[in-house]
Amino acid sequence: MTQFAVEPYKQVTIRSYMKYESAEAFAKAATHALSKGMGGRLGNFFWANGVIFKHSPYAQTDSVTKQYLEGMLTLDHIEYALMSEFRNEIRVEDFVLTVLDVSKHTLFRELTKWIKGTLEKK
């Protein structure tokens, strides 16, 4: 018989972060370098517990894989803003940022609680 186990990360390390004053400011920064008039959708923005965020993991290497297997997750960078109500998209000029509700994702739910409880108090 096959056995299954859920083993959460023992530690999550975040190397750097950037807070934006609002979800709109975050969206403007994300689209700033894109050509005006191009338009389009941008994905990979997440929301949970009143926080919109985007994270940058490290590239998959042998050492990163070893850390994962040891229960350690290191994220290079997190950008976030407070956004009390979930919206599945944010429009900025010709661009639409797609936002996914990850409030039921165990890691992201805990991450956003930590952001609000720790980073927001700095």
Image (cartoon, helix red, strand yellow):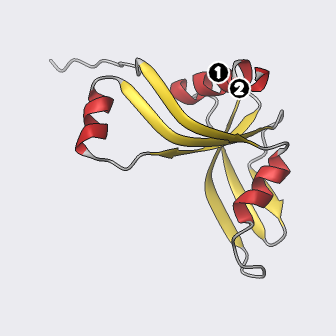
Identify the mark nearer the N-term, 1 or 2. Answer: 1
Task: Determine which residue is flagged by label 1.
Answer: 114
The spot of residue 4 in percent (x, y) is 27, 19
The spot of residue 42 in percent (x, y) is 65, 62
The front one of 78 and 108 is 78
Could you tell whether 120 is left or right of 110 in the image? right
Name which residue type carries label 1: Trp
> At x 28% / y 23%, what residue is drawn?
70
The front one of 40 and 3 is 40
**Figure quadrant of the C terminus:** top right
Task: Determine which residue is flagged by label 2.
Answer: 119
Quarter residue 117 falls in: top right
Name which residue type carries label 2: Leu
Q: Residues within 10 Å of mark 1 (few under 14, many from 20)?
A: few
> At x 64% / y 30%, what residue is drawn?
103
Indicate which label's residue lies in the foreground, 1 or 2: 2
Q: Which residue lies furthest to the left in this view?
A: 1
> At x 73% / y 23%, what residue is drawn?
116
> At x 77% / y 79%, what residue is drawn?
36
The spot of residue 51 in percent (x, y) is 73, 34
Alpha carbon of mark 1 to alpha carbon of mark 2: how far?
Answer: 7 Å
